[in-house]
Image (tube, rainbow, N blue to C red):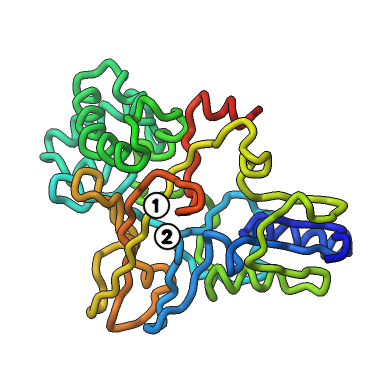
Protein backbone atom coordinates (compact mmCIF):
# COMPACT_ATOMS: atom_id res chain seq x y z
CA UNK A 1 0.00 0.00 0.00
CA UNK A 2 1.32 3.43 -0.96
CA UNK A 3 1.69 6.19 1.60
CA UNK A 4 -1.73 7.24 2.91
CA UNK A 5 -2.54 10.93 3.23
CA UNK A 6 -5.31 10.41 5.82
CA UNK A 7 -5.85 7.12 7.62
CA UNK A 8 -9.06 6.62 9.61
CA UNK A 9 -9.23 3.59 11.89
CA UNK A 10 -12.72 2.33 12.72
CA UNK A 11 -15.76 2.31 10.45
CA UNK A 12 -18.43 3.15 12.99
CA UNK A 13 -20.20 6.50 13.22
CA UNK A 14 -17.12 8.46 14.36
CA UNK A 15 -14.79 7.03 11.73
CA UNK A 16 -17.32 7.43 8.93
CA UNK A 17 -17.94 11.09 9.83
CA UNK A 18 -14.19 11.78 10.02
CA UNK A 19 -13.73 10.23 6.58
CA UNK A 20 -16.60 12.16 5.00
CA UNK A 21 -15.51 15.52 6.39
CA UNK A 22 -11.89 14.99 5.29
CA UNK A 23 -13.02 13.95 1.82
CA UNK A 24 -15.60 16.68 1.46
CA UNK A 25 -14.27 19.70 3.34
CA UNK A 26 -10.53 19.23 2.73
CA UNK A 27 -10.99 17.54 -0.68
CA UNK A 28 -8.31 15.01 0.28
CA UNK A 29 -8.04 11.27 -0.17
CA UNK A 30 -8.77 9.16 2.88
CA UNK A 31 -8.43 5.44 3.58
CA UNK A 32 -10.77 4.01 6.22
CA UNK A 33 -9.96 0.62 7.72
CA UNK A 34 -11.79 -1.68 10.12
CA UNK A 35 -10.90 -5.07 11.57
CA UNK A 36 -14.54 -6.15 11.21
CA UNK A 37 -15.80 -7.57 7.92
CA UNK A 38 -18.57 -4.97 7.69
CA UNK A 39 -19.07 -1.21 7.99
CA UNK A 40 -21.10 0.63 10.68
CA UNK A 41 -19.28 -0.80 13.71
CA UNK A 42 -21.59 -1.84 16.53
CA UNK A 43 -24.49 -0.03 14.85
CA UNK A 44 -24.46 -2.59 12.04
CA UNK A 45 -27.90 -3.89 11.11
CA UNK A 46 -29.33 -6.15 8.40
CA UNK A 47 -32.65 -7.36 7.01
CA UNK A 48 -33.32 -10.95 8.05
CA UNK A 49 -35.32 -13.49 6.06
CA UNK A 50 -38.58 -12.08 7.48
CA UNK A 51 -37.84 -8.52 6.38
CA UNK A 52 -37.06 -7.43 9.96
CA UNK A 53 -34.20 -4.98 10.45
CA UNK A 54 -32.08 -6.66 13.14
CA UNK A 55 -29.35 -4.83 15.10
CA UNK A 56 -26.49 -7.35 15.25
CA UNK A 57 -24.92 -5.83 18.37
CA UNK A 58 -28.09 -4.97 20.28
CA UNK A 59 -30.62 -2.15 20.12
CA UNK A 60 -29.40 1.27 18.97
CA UNK A 61 -31.50 4.46 19.02
CA UNK A 62 -30.11 7.66 17.52
CA UNK A 63 -30.74 10.69 19.72
CA UNK A 64 -29.25 14.16 20.08
CA UNK A 65 -30.22 17.66 21.10
CA UNK A 66 -27.48 19.20 18.94
CA UNK A 67 -29.04 20.51 15.73
CA UNK A 68 -25.81 20.56 13.63
CA UNK A 69 -25.31 16.86 14.46
CA UNK A 70 -28.90 16.03 13.45
CA UNK A 71 -28.63 18.14 10.29
CA UNK A 72 -25.37 16.49 9.22
CA UNK A 73 -26.64 12.93 9.66
CA UNK A 74 -29.99 13.86 8.07
CA UNK A 75 -28.17 14.57 4.80
CA UNK A 76 -27.75 10.81 4.43
CA UNK A 77 -31.04 9.39 5.67
CA UNK A 78 -34.71 9.99 6.20
CA UNK A 79 -35.92 9.13 9.68
CA UNK A 80 -38.50 6.91 11.26
CA UNK A 81 -39.57 8.91 14.35
CA UNK A 82 -38.90 6.81 17.42
CA UNK A 83 -39.43 8.20 20.91
CA UNK A 84 -37.69 5.36 22.71
CA UNK A 85 -39.54 3.90 25.70
CA UNK A 86 -38.16 1.15 27.94
CA UNK A 87 -40.19 -0.94 30.34
CA UNK A 88 -39.16 -3.25 33.13
CA UNK A 89 -40.57 -6.19 35.07
CA UNK A 90 -41.01 -5.05 38.69
CA UNK A 91 -43.06 -7.11 41.18
CA UNK A 92 -44.88 -8.77 38.29
CA UNK A 93 -45.81 -5.43 36.68
CA UNK A 94 -44.42 -4.09 33.40
CA UNK A 95 -43.65 -0.46 34.29
CA UNK A 96 -41.80 2.46 32.65
CA UNK A 97 -38.03 2.60 33.10
CA UNK A 98 -36.45 4.91 34.28
CA UNK A 99 -38.75 4.88 37.30
CA UNK A 100 -41.11 7.85 37.08
CA UNK A 101 -44.47 9.00 38.45
CA UNK A 102 -46.32 6.61 36.15
CA UNK A 103 -44.26 3.74 37.56
CA UNK A 104 -45.01 4.97 41.08
CA UNK A 105 -48.79 5.00 40.58
CA UNK A 106 -48.77 1.65 38.83
CA UNK A 107 -46.89 -0.13 41.63
CA UNK A 108 -48.36 1.38 44.82
CA UNK A 109 -51.85 1.93 46.26
CA UNK A 110 -53.39 5.27 45.31
CA UNK A 111 -53.19 6.91 48.74
CA UNK A 112 -49.58 5.83 49.16
CA UNK A 113 -48.45 6.88 45.67
CA UNK A 114 -50.15 10.29 46.01
CA UNK A 115 -48.34 10.97 49.29
CA UNK A 116 -44.98 9.91 47.89
CA UNK A 117 -45.52 12.01 44.75
CA UNK A 118 -46.14 15.12 46.86
CA UNK A 119 -42.97 14.41 48.86
CA UNK A 120 -40.93 14.01 45.68
CA UNK A 121 -42.21 17.24 44.10
CA UNK A 122 -41.89 19.14 47.38
CA UNK A 123 -38.27 18.06 47.86
CA UNK A 124 -36.92 18.12 44.32
CA UNK A 125 -39.51 19.83 42.09
CA UNK A 126 -41.27 18.54 38.98
CA UNK A 127 -39.77 17.33 35.71
CA UNK A 128 -36.35 16.73 37.26
CA UNK A 129 -34.12 13.66 37.42
CA UNK A 130 -32.74 12.47 40.75
CA UNK A 131 -30.02 9.77 40.87
CA UNK A 132 -31.04 6.85 43.03
CA UNK A 133 -28.06 7.28 45.37
CA UNK A 134 -29.11 10.90 46.01
CA UNK A 135 -32.70 9.93 46.68
CA UNK A 136 -31.55 7.56 49.42
CA UNK A 137 -30.12 10.54 51.34
CA UNK A 138 -33.26 12.73 51.11
CA UNK A 139 -33.97 12.72 54.86
CA UNK A 140 -37.68 11.93 54.47
CA UNK A 141 -39.21 8.59 55.54
CA UNK A 142 -41.45 8.33 52.44
CA UNK A 143 -38.57 9.11 50.10
CA UNK A 144 -36.20 6.82 51.98
CA UNK A 145 -38.77 4.03 51.63
CA UNK A 146 -39.14 4.73 47.92
CA UNK A 147 -35.38 4.92 47.45
CA UNK A 148 -34.87 1.57 49.16
CA UNK A 149 -37.68 0.00 47.12
CA UNK A 150 -36.25 1.25 43.82
CA UNK A 151 -32.73 0.36 44.90
CA UNK A 152 -33.70 -3.23 45.68
CA UNK A 153 -36.19 -3.79 42.86
CA UNK A 154 -34.54 -1.96 39.96
CA UNK A 155 -30.95 -0.90 40.59
CA UNK A 156 -29.21 -3.43 42.81
CA UNK A 157 -29.54 -6.71 40.94
CA UNK A 158 -29.56 -5.05 37.51
CA UNK A 159 -26.28 -3.30 38.35
CA UNK A 160 -24.82 -6.53 39.71
CA UNK A 161 -25.71 -8.26 36.44
CA UNK A 162 -24.70 -5.38 34.16
CA UNK A 163 -21.44 -4.30 35.81
CA UNK A 164 -20.55 -7.12 38.18
CA UNK A 165 -20.31 -4.64 41.08
CA UNK A 166 -22.66 -2.79 43.47
CA UNK A 167 -23.98 0.66 42.43
CA UNK A 168 -21.82 2.40 45.06
CA UNK A 169 -18.71 1.03 43.35
CA UNK A 170 -19.61 2.60 40.01
CA UNK A 171 -18.94 6.24 39.14
CA UNK A 172 -22.05 8.40 39.90
CA UNK A 173 -22.17 9.45 36.25
CA UNK A 174 -23.13 5.87 35.38
CA UNK A 175 -25.85 5.37 38.01
CA UNK A 176 -27.06 8.88 37.20
CA UNK A 177 -27.79 7.80 33.63
CA UNK A 178 -30.78 5.82 34.88
CA UNK A 179 -32.31 8.17 37.45
CA UNK A 180 -35.67 8.49 39.13
CA UNK A 181 -37.58 10.89 36.90
CA UNK A 182 -40.11 13.07 38.72
CA UNK A 183 -42.30 13.40 35.66
CA UNK A 184 -45.02 11.69 33.62
CA UNK A 185 -42.63 11.49 30.66
CA UNK A 186 -42.16 7.79 29.84
CA UNK A 187 -39.39 8.32 27.29
CA UNK A 188 -35.94 6.90 27.99
CA UNK A 189 -34.31 9.97 26.39
CA UNK A 190 -35.57 13.56 26.37
CA UNK A 191 -33.48 14.73 23.42
CA UNK A 192 -35.20 16.92 20.82
CA UNK A 193 -34.15 14.67 17.95
CA UNK A 194 -34.71 10.91 18.15
CA UNK A 195 -35.17 8.31 15.47
CA UNK A 196 -34.09 5.25 13.53
CA UNK A 197 -32.59 5.66 10.02
CA UNK A 198 -35.42 4.75 7.66
CA UNK A 199 -33.24 2.30 5.70
CA UNK A 200 -31.21 1.19 8.72
CA UNK A 201 -27.84 2.18 10.17
CA UNK A 202 -25.76 0.19 7.69
CA UNK A 203 -27.34 1.98 4.74
CA UNK A 204 -26.85 5.33 6.49
CA UNK A 205 -23.11 4.67 6.93
CA UNK A 206 -22.90 3.46 3.31
CA UNK A 207 -24.22 6.83 2.16
CA UNK A 208 -21.84 8.77 4.41
CA UNK A 209 -18.94 6.84 2.86
CA UNK A 210 -20.17 7.26 -0.72
CA UNK A 211 -17.54 9.77 -1.88
CA UNK A 212 -14.86 9.53 -4.54
CA UNK A 213 -12.14 10.47 -2.06
CA UNK A 214 -12.96 7.64 0.38
CA UNK A 215 -11.53 4.13 0.15
CA UNK A 216 -12.82 1.51 2.62
CA UNK A 217 -10.76 -1.56 3.57
CA UNK A 218 -12.56 -4.10 5.76
CA UNK A 219 -11.05 -7.07 7.65
CA UNK A 220 -7.97 -4.85 7.98
CA UNK A 221 -6.52 -4.43 11.47
CA UNK A 222 -4.53 -1.30 12.26
CA UNK A 223 -0.74 -1.59 12.29
CA UNK A 224 1.77 1.07 13.27
CA UNK A 225 3.81 -0.09 10.29
CA UNK A 226 1.26 1.53 7.98
CA UNK A 227 2.63 4.58 6.18
CA UNK A 228 0.42 7.63 6.69
CA UNK A 229 0.61 11.42 7.15
CA UNK A 230 -2.39 11.83 9.47
CA UNK A 231 -4.10 9.30 11.70
CA UNK A 232 -7.69 9.49 13.00
CA UNK A 233 -7.98 6.59 15.44
CA UNK A 234 -11.37 5.63 16.89
CA UNK A 235 -10.38 2.25 18.35
CA UNK A 236 -9.49 1.26 21.94
CA UNK A 237 -6.84 3.64 23.28
CA UNK A 238 -5.08 0.99 25.42
CA UNK A 239 -4.72 -1.21 22.36
CA UNK A 240 -3.23 1.69 20.39
CA UNK A 241 -0.45 1.95 23.00
CA UNK A 242 0.11 -1.83 22.91
CA UNK A 243 -1.20 -2.15 26.50
CA UNK A 244 2.08 -0.79 27.83
CA UNK A 245 0.24 0.72 30.83
CA UNK A 246 -2.16 -2.20 31.18
CA UNK A 247 -5.66 -2.88 29.89
CA UNK A 248 -8.66 -0.63 30.45
CA UNK A 249 -11.55 -2.70 31.83
CA UNK A 250 -14.74 -3.13 29.82
CA UNK A 251 -17.94 -5.11 30.05
CA UNK A 252 -19.21 -7.12 27.12
CA UNK A 253 -22.58 -8.63 26.20
CA UNK A 254 -23.59 -12.02 24.88
CA UNK A 255 -26.64 -11.66 22.65
CA UNK A 256 -28.87 -14.68 22.18
CA UNK A 257 -31.09 -14.11 19.12
CA UNK A 258 -34.35 -16.06 18.95
CA UNK A 259 -37.01 -16.10 16.23
CA UNK A 260 -40.59 -16.75 17.31
CA UNK A 261 -43.41 -17.95 15.02
CA UNK A 262 -45.87 -15.22 15.98
CA UNK A 263 -46.38 -11.55 15.27
CA UNK A 264 -44.96 -10.08 18.45
CA UNK A 265 -43.21 -11.28 21.58
CA UNK A 266 -43.58 -8.33 24.00
CA UNK A 267 -45.33 -4.97 24.30
CA UNK A 268 -42.29 -2.71 23.92
CA UNK A 269 -39.05 -2.57 21.95
CA UNK A 270 -37.00 -3.14 25.10
CA UNK A 271 -38.06 -4.71 28.41
CA UNK A 272 -35.63 -4.85 31.34
CA UNK A 273 -35.51 -7.66 33.88
CA UNK A 274 -33.82 -6.19 36.98
CA UNK A 275 -34.53 -9.01 39.47
CA UNK A 276 -35.66 -11.92 37.32
CA UNK A 277 -33.58 -14.28 35.16
CA UNK A 278 -29.93 -13.99 34.22
CA UNK A 279 -30.43 -11.69 31.25
CA UNK A 280 -30.77 -7.93 31.76
CA UNK A 281 -33.17 -7.14 28.95
CA UNK A 282 -34.89 -8.38 25.83
CA UNK A 283 -35.03 -6.31 22.66
CA UNK A 284 -37.60 -6.87 19.91
CA UNK A 285 -36.42 -5.34 16.65
CA UNK A 286 -39.54 -5.02 14.52
CA UNK A 287 -40.74 -2.18 16.80
CA UNK A 288 -38.00 0.21 15.68
CA UNK A 289 -39.10 0.53 12.03
CA UNK A 290 -42.58 -0.97 12.49
CA UNK A 291 -41.59 -3.93 10.31
CA UNK A 292 -44.52 -6.14 9.35
CA UNK A 293 -44.14 -9.91 9.62
CA UNK A 294 -46.02 -12.87 11.06
CA UNK A 295 -42.77 -13.79 12.84
CA UNK A 296 -40.56 -11.79 15.19
CA UNK A 297 -36.93 -11.66 16.31
CA UNK A 298 -35.73 -10.82 19.81
CA UNK A 299 -32.38 -10.78 21.58
CA UNK A 300 -31.72 -11.77 25.17
CA UNK A 301 -28.81 -9.74 26.62
CA UNK A 302 -26.39 -11.41 29.03
CA UNK A 303 -23.67 -9.06 30.37
CA UNK A 304 -20.28 -10.67 30.69
CA UNK A 305 -16.66 -9.80 31.29
CA UNK A 306 -14.74 -8.51 28.27
CA UNK A 307 -12.00 -10.87 27.11
CA UNK A 308 -9.67 -9.61 24.43
CA UNK A 309 -9.91 -11.70 21.27
CA UNK A 310 -13.04 -13.51 22.47
CA UNK A 311 -15.82 -10.89 22.51
CA UNK A 312 -16.63 -7.23 21.89
CA UNK A 313 -16.01 -4.20 24.11
CA UNK A 314 -19.38 -2.65 24.95
CA UNK A 315 -19.14 -0.47 28.06
CA UNK A 316 -16.08 1.04 29.77
CA UNK A 317 -16.17 0.43 33.52
CA UNK A 318 -16.23 3.94 34.97
CA UNK A 319 -14.27 4.03 38.22
CA UNK A 320 -11.77 6.60 39.48
CA UNK A 321 -8.72 4.35 39.05
CA UNK A 322 -9.80 3.47 35.50
CA UNK A 323 -10.12 7.16 34.60
CA UNK A 324 -6.58 7.74 35.92
CA UNK A 325 -5.28 4.94 33.69
CA UNK A 326 -7.23 6.31 30.71
CA UNK A 327 -5.75 9.80 31.27
CA UNK A 328 -2.22 8.37 31.42
Near-viewer residue (281 or 309): 309
At a point 33% along the width and 23% down the height, the residue shown is 123
Near-viewer residue (10 or 111): 10
Which one is in front in this view, the residue at disc 1 or the one at disc 2? Answer: 1
Residue 130, quarter of the rendered image: top left
Near-viewer residue (36 or 296): 36
Depicted 253 relative to depicted 115: above or below: below
Q: Crowding at label 2, few (<14), some or many (≥20) Cα neighbours within 10 Å?
A: many
Question: Mark 1–mark 2 contact, CB under 8 Å?
Answer: yes
At a point 65% along the width and 61% down the height, the residue shown is 34
Depicted 323 relative to depicted 11: above or below: above
Q: Label 2, secondary structure: give it.
A: loop
Depicted 235 relative to depicted 121: above or below: below
Earlier sequence position, callout 1 versus callout 2: 2
Real-space CA distance between mark 1 and mark 2, rounded to the nearest whole angstrom: 9 Å
Horizontal side of residue 6 vs 82, given as left or right: right
Q: Position of residue 100 (x, y in %)?
A: 30, 42
Near-viewer residue (17 or 214): 214
Q: Residue furthest top?
A: 139
Q: Where is residue 65 in the image (x, y as percent from the top left)?
A: 58, 49
Image quadrant occupied by the C terminus? top right
Q: Is residue 190 visible?
A: no
Residue 159, quarter of the rendered image: top left
Q: Label 1, secondary structure: give it.
A: strand
Horizontal side of residue 9 vs 163, given as left or right: right
Depicted 192 relative to depicted 199: above or below: above
Q: Disc 2 marks which residue?
A: 58
Q: Where is residue 305 in the image (x, y as percent from the top left)?
A: 40, 44
Q: Disc 1 marks which residue?
A: 253
Q: Is residue 168 visible?
A: yes
Amino acid sequence: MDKIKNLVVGCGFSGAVFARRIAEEWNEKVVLIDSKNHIAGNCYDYLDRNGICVHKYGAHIFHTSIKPVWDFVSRFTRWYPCQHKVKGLVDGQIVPIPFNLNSLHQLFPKSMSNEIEQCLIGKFGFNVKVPILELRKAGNKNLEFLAEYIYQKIFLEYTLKQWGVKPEEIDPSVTGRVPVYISRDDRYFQDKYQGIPLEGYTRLIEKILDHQNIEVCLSTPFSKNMDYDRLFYTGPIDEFFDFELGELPYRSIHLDFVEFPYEKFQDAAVINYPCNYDWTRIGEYKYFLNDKSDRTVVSYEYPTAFERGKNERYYPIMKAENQVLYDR
